[in-house]
Amino acid sequence: MTRLRLLVAASLLAAAPAFGGTDMAPVQPGQLEGRPAAGESSPLQALVDRAAPGATVEVGPGRYVGDLFLDKPIRLVGRGRPLLVGAGSGSVVRVRGPHVTVEGFDIDGRGGGDLGRDSSGVHVSAPAAAVRGCRIVRCLFGVYLREAPGTVVEDCEITGIPGKDPGEKGSGLHVWNTDGFAFRRNTVVDVRDGFYIQSSSHGEIRGNVARDLRYGIHYMFSDDNVFEDNVFENGAAGGALMYSKRIRFRRNQFLRNRGFASVGLLFKTCDRVVAEANLLADNARGLFIEDSYDNVFRGNVVAASDVALVVYAGCGRNRFEGNSFVANLTPLTLVGRTTDTSFDGNYWSDNPEPDLDGDGRSDRPYRLSSVFDHFRGNLLAADLFSQSFAASAIGAAEETFPVLQEITAVDHAPLARAPALPDVPRRAPRRSAAHGPAVAGSAGILVAGTALLALGRRLPAS
Amino acid sequence: MKGAFLLCARQELLLAVRSRWTQIFAFVFAGLSLAVSASGYALSGGHGIQDFARTSASLVQLVLLLVPLSALLIGVLSLAPERGAAELLFSQPLGRPVILLGQVAGLWAALTAAQAIGFGAAGVVVFSNAGGEGLAGFLVLFAGSSVLTAVFLGIAALLSAGAVGRRRARALALALVVWFIAVVLFDVAALGLASLLRSGTASRVLIVSVLVNPVGALRTGALLALQGTTAFGSASLAFLRFTKGTVGAGLLLGGSLLLWTVVPLALATRRLSRADI
């Protein structure tokens, strides 16, 4: 019944061009998407337009096809998870007025729109918006904040467009030129970057999950940001911090970034960052740092990486202290000859030195880099020998006859015992498949080998 | 002819199985592979980070270290003719090549059986803890291990062909030298050479040296089969580009191992035919 009335209202809207002055002109890339064209407008549009500023508009369950334009303070609340289906040519919900709240909707972008126009599930270009409890699917961008200070996105689930290349997709939560924003408890899957923050300060990002994408979190030219208690999993990089200053982050997990040249956490031209109590586990490379100064890494765990740290020569005055480096194939790749990065006072699980005087520190310094590590940092194919005995032999020779070269990366006071480690979460079990045959096959090999040896002893010597 | 070959093989298998050396090798290999597979879990805190890949990478190291050593030592000890027994054996109306190939086949069967015990035990531990993932890589490693046995038995045959009396000791010493070169020295030399060259040439030198050395070939093939391109990071891709894809890599690595099996054996039969026993 309501829907019928809404449809009538929508057709009235179409007959009244005065309502949408800008609707007919096509939107150029980089410009703001305005009021949707009459044929692409949501049946809820009339309801919203009639509401007084500051009113709460409740929407019942149902499927509403068309884009929605919100240009005044309003609280739009979905009851029974109504589904907003976009017209397929641009953003589904366009927030253009301050203090707009969108809550409790399912939003389907139908894979349409255009990266250049920032086509999103919810596109916010006004201060102090709130998006809560929405499920956004098949949109180029999930929620896009363009000059939207004070906006909050909470408890949303965003899934990108399946089957597209990362370059053809947008970010889950995208922020541009916005001072102050908050993302809490959102889940982002299968997009380009989970959280992309450009030229935006004073944001806080807490308790979110981003997985199966390119970068979990990506800062560009964004100073004074905080992110805590997030999980970034299975991407080209868990986190990429670029051209930004004074970012602080704690208790995040950067997990299983295992692809070609993948990194748990990447720093490029970032200064005065503080990282505490984060977990970087099962990454191809744990932490990659280039052209960055005065950063502090304290109490983090880097575990089960092929290379725990990759440090480029253009870095200075960085400090690692109280971190645990556990079960990494190589602790450090140093690209360039020297570094003034301080590695004093960390725990290294492959440090063989004992602590005989019981002061909690190993009695001798721990050398992080061998000639071979230096070599592989500068010559790609040397990695082919990374697990050879030759590499170990070169390392041992260097320990025994320290004439080969002056080693520059040393922990002068390595911790003798690992600090308390955070628990590494298990990967979702995939073990149901083919578990039995593999065990049975191994048992078969075991029995066959034993049988041949035993039988051979019994056989008469012809 | 075929009967004679099988007879020699059976005889050598019986001798090898009853030899203390084979039994010690089987015991040590099984013990170490069990230790590696069990401690893979203890060391990762029981959380199963990279369950199978990390554990099997340690198994690869074990194979690369022990299998060439055991094949060379047991090979030389069994194949270098002892004066009395060899005179009797080679006076039989059989071609020397048939005798030699039969002996090598028997030794190979015994050593592969000894390795099977270690692999089987490790596989039961790993797969019952980590699930069935990686079975194919595991089988590739087992197959590679038995091929490596054949390679170094062939080299042992070449070293010990006609090494009667005092020359037995020399053959044994040479076997140890060959082992050290194949497992360590060759790679060190390749790295050293590469460090003197320009980057592009150096990469080609390293890739070719990995293909040429049977130990390097097995290491590369097994780790690629077990871990995919994450095994060596971007170097895997450089390697695969050089070999024109995974099929090319398999053919080149397999061809290298095949040549290393066939050529020393052929040389050994030739040398034995001319030897004065």
Image (cartoon, rainbow, N blue to C red):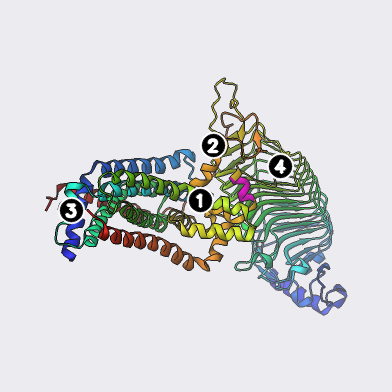
At x 85%, y 73%, the residue is A20
Label 1 marks a residue whose chain is B
Q: Amino acid at mark 4?
A: Thr
Whether callout 2 and callout 4 share a subunit is answered yes
Of B228 and A230, the residue lying toward us: B228
User: Is disc 2 in contact with disc 4, using a CB cutoff of under 8 Å?
Assistant: no
Badge 1 element: helix
| Residue linked to disc 4 | A338
Of B190 and B223, the residue lying toward us: B190
Please indicate whether residue A33 sits to the left or right of residue A437 in the image. right
| Residue linked to disc 3 | B11
User: Is disc 2 in contact with disc 1, using a CB cutoff of under 8 Å?
Assistant: no
In this rendering, the label closer to the viewer, 2 or 1: 1
Residue range in magenta is: A372-377
In this rendering, the label closer to the viewer, 4 or 1: 1
Whether callout 3 and callout 4 share a subunit is answered no
